[in-house]
Image (cartoon, rainbow, N blue to C red):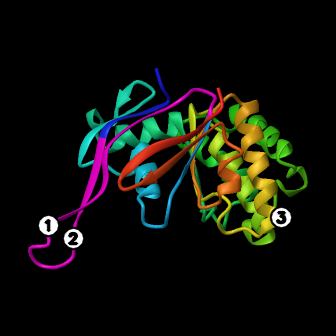
Amino acid sequence: MYPIELKGVSKAFPSAGKGSGELLILDKIDFAAQEGVSTAIIGKSGSGKSTLLQIAGGLDSPTEGMVICSGTDFATLNDKQKSYHRNQHIGFIFQANLLLEDFTALENVLVPALISGTKEKDCRQRAMDLLEMTGLTERLNHYPSQLSGGEKQRVAICRALINNPDVILADEPTGALDEENASQIENLLLSLAKAEKKSLLLVTHNNDFAQKCDRVYLLTNRKLTLIKDVK
């Protein structure tokens, strides 16, 4: 069983203008995220990378094909079930960290666990351990406005890991950072994913970041092509 599997996934959007038909973004994509393997998807802007990641995470639906997350077809779930399934099996990291400004770093990390119904006393220690692993022990009670860009993204990584997900999906996780902070976050994300034995699927414009992953796919002409595979 794969953490995420796409079978014959296509995605089309209505084209602008009367009678323009549809714009095909993805065409019969087959892909499986391997357990414990880091995978990068690269490609030009507008090639459909983020769309593919959103479909893989159940945030968008394919026009055709199936998306199976940890053995469950997203198409068989209603919106509430889909949200719960994502919460339990997928950790998300975005370019915009999406931290809650009125919550401390620790509280932000706890949010997905509390949403899942876990009592704070049962997940607080894991949250603190994750923040310690990312060098944020002294920032537990700081608010996002008191954190640097790199620190905010570290909190976002901890938040993605709090529920012990099967897979981490990351959309340009270092795109808003300067070169030094980006490099630190890249290495941290990859090392944490490996230490936690998580699958990592990321999309990025940064080829150097992509090449640090076990596998690299190129998305071009609506198709995925494997261009690197470290077995």
Q: In the rendered structure, find residue 81 and report the number of the disc placed on it.
A: none
Which residue carries the number 1 mark? 21
Q: Earlier in the sequence, mark 2 or mark 3?
A: 2
Residue drawn 58% across and 34% down?
165
Q: In the rendered structure, find residue 15 and report the number of the disc placed on it.
A: 2
Which residue carries the number 3 mark? 180
Residue drawn 78% across and 67% down?
179
Quick one: which residue is furthest to the left in this view?
A: 19
Q: Quadrant of residue 208?
A: bottom right
Left or right: 93, with 73 as reference point = right
Give the alpha-carbon distance from disc 1 to disc 3, as whole Å: 45 Å
Place of residue 114 in the rendered image (x, y in percent of width and height, measured from the top left): 59, 42
Place of residue 128 in the rendered image (x, y in percent of width and height, measured from the top left): 80, 42
Magenta region: 9-37
**Kind of residue at badge 1:** Gly
Quick one: which residue is furthest to the top in this view?
A: 1
Residue 22 shown in magenta? yes
Q: Nearer the viewer, residue 144 or 13?
A: 13
Place of residue 210 in the rendered image (x, y in percent of width and height, measured from the top left): 65, 50
Give the alpha-carbon distance from disc 2 to disc 1, as whole Å: 6 Å
**Kind of residue at badge 2:** Ser
Left or right: 174, with 181 as reference point = left
